[in-house]
Amino acid sequence: MAKIEQIAKKSDATRLSRRNFLMTAAGAGLMFGFARKAGAATTLPSAMPPEAAFEPNIWCAIAPDGSINVNIVRAEMGQHVGTALARIIADEMDADWDKIKITQVDTAPKWAGKYVTGGSWSVWDTWDTFRQAGAAARSVMLTEGAKLLGTTPERCTVSESVVSAGGKSVSFGDIVARAKPTQTFTPEEMAKLPLKPTSNRRLISKQVPALDIPDKTTGKAIYGIDVKLDGMVYGRPKMPPTRYAAKVISVDDSAAKKIPGYVRYVVLDDPSGIVPGWVVALAKTYPAAIRAADALKVQWTPGPTINVSEADIIEHGRKLAADPKNGTRVFNDKGVDEALTIHPGQVFERSYTCASVAHYQLEPVNAVARHIDGMWEVHTGNQWQSLILPQLAKALQVPEEQVVMRTYMLGGGFGRRLNGDYCIPAALTSKAIGGAPVKLILTRSDDMELDSIRSPSIQTIKVALDNDRKKIVGMDYVAVAGWPTQVMAPAFLATGEDGKKYDPFAIAGADHWYETGPTRVRAISNDLANATFRPGWLRSVSAGWTPWALECFLDELAHSTKQDPLAFRLSMFTAQGRNAGQAPNSVGGAKRQAAVLQRLADKIGYANKQLPADTGIGIATSFGQERGMPTWTAGAAQIHVNRKTGVVTCQKLWLVLDAGTIVDPGGALAQTEGAALWGFSMALFEGTEIVNGTIKDRNLNTYTPLRIPDVPDIDIEFIQNTEKPTGLGEPGVTVVAPAIGNAIFNAVGIRLRHMPMRPADVRRELQQHRS
């Protein structure tokens, strides 16, 4: 007991084989981190550069042996982000790709505010900075290399980490070793450097080996769940009945004391208010901690949301939407109400709902925390360190400068690890036992109960048509959901046209690029949802459900007015006004969205497709994650409906995307495939509900995402151009559900307005359709 509760001594940092870790349940522990002063190992094939390395900026360093280290402030969770980002610097440097290594950084002050991996931002947000960083390194190599070659930079060429002139050459490594350059660049100086033309790129848009594959393949890659420290105790939480406001009345651990390895329990005192009412069982092994938590008998006073259901949240949202005074106006053109009033006989209105969705990432959330050398260390996989750091400091009641996070690979993130709430109980438990290292791992059911789920939502779209019922002359669009940014990162709320704040990640997708006459888009926060659970950013966030409503609505409207759905959409991509686009992110505006949609139609043979009975193809289009950095996306789905069972079988998906410059073709394809399959899964298979104030489905026996036998053929195409790259982690999600919904109508003539579209829903609508 004394050993468990003492603060562990600092260990020498050593690379740990994941396979060996899994095979060795006991033995001495190792500390992992990434700060150079700790001499720690990286999760990827390199360590931090040696002190002799030349660092022209904080982003890269060239060592005397010629190796080039690139610092990555984006989390690696299966998307090969380091490979994509490192090649931006390497290409601009004219570096040898075989010399490139990457380091995932920790929360040192120089990275403050930079470490966020979400929103499909990584390549888009890094593009300019890393090109400039690469140009800075190249300029020094060129200048110093020319001196060593006895010539001028203008007479030199650079290729594959070698500077050449007049039949002589010198490598980057030799330049660093011999010239010992010291020149550094500020961001302002880097921004003024010339960049290479597109025609000279050798790595951008080309296939190169992914840098993280070897360690993942051999089992050397280190994930948060692998961490082990000397003197570490394991913890598992006993979850309260409600997310908020639960209070512990009593704890009986008499049964837990009979479990070998059980140490004690801790009732957490959380000044941050993130994990109120938590009790953590501590044990010498994790299996013992699991059993001990089950054995604890805890009585709580639950929070006020103990009886809230999913239906309550959606109905509350419906009432909020009905009051025109509620919410924030994202678009607020003059004349919306007049258009709806002048054309009362030509008003078309529909409402759409979506269920709660959980993340279910492969690696359950976990963290190791300890107090050492006057600092609180948290070892974990996380997507947004700068968000959770101040919350950790508040929970621990210490200055933020006394908290550091050591970052590891993530066994799946999908937005779940943007919210680092799972770090709080690990840190508080360690504090409760004097700062000794605590490894807190949530079981799958714990993980789901804590999960910051995608909020259930309701959307109502109303349009006025002209006298010929062919053209939209006014639109009123309202979307109601729990707002993750309001709950977790209010500083990132946007400001609407009416001056009020709103969550851009709870409305993106509804702020469309169609010309619909005077248009009002209203975003409303569902306060009941916010109070019941912690709304989260789940892959594509609102863009996973707003296109579902908008694209199904437009399809239904086109059929209702006897128009072709493709031609109807294309007619509204006028690229005028706010839809014209602007440099550098949305050059071409709505015309680029029209182009991907037309290309999709050509690919699928839209005009001449002949299909069997009860089989249909549906189309949809959107613009990816955010209006400010659009990835123009169009999708089609071919499905078959079994009229007897209601089962919808997706036979093929097509996607066409324009994401500007495709930096990493292999990564882009993998990201889009994964996103499309998630969109497909949410359309037909997965979703849960709130029951008695918490998530109903706690494991994969009742929560049923897409299984391998259900995966359809997928055809993905990227439009080739040289515009600034935008995101590809999430856009593939956006168009799949509406394409399937529209395909179901084309197959059997029914409209489904709730997602997921279950067989029971299909059977019900077919029955009503027949009657």
Image: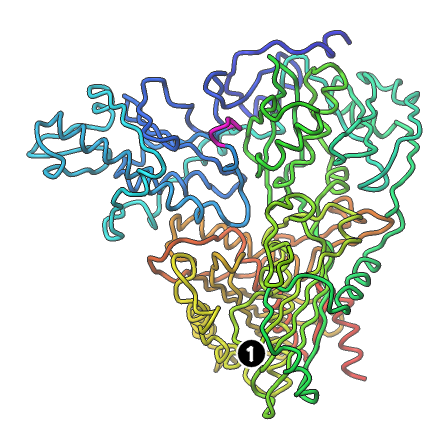
Which quadrant of the figure contains the N terminus? top right
Colour pattern of the rendering:
rainbow
Taking 538 as reference, is 163 left or right?
left
Taking 327 as reference, is 301 left or right?
right
| Image x and y of residue 560, in percent | 64, 85
Which quadrant of the figure contains the C terminus? bottom right
In the image, is residue 561 above or below residue 318?
A: below
Residue at x 35%, y 43% (from the top left corner): 88
In the image, is residue 39 above or below residue 120?
A: above
Circle 1: residue type? Gly
Depth check: 75 or 641 in front? Answer: 75
> Among all residues in the image, which is located at the extreme bottom?
468
Please give the residue where the numbered disc 1 appears in the rendered image: 517
Magenta stretch encompasses residue 109: yes
Magenta-highlighted residues = 106-111
Crowd rating for badge 1 (residues with CA inside 10 Å; few <14, some 14–19, many 20+): many
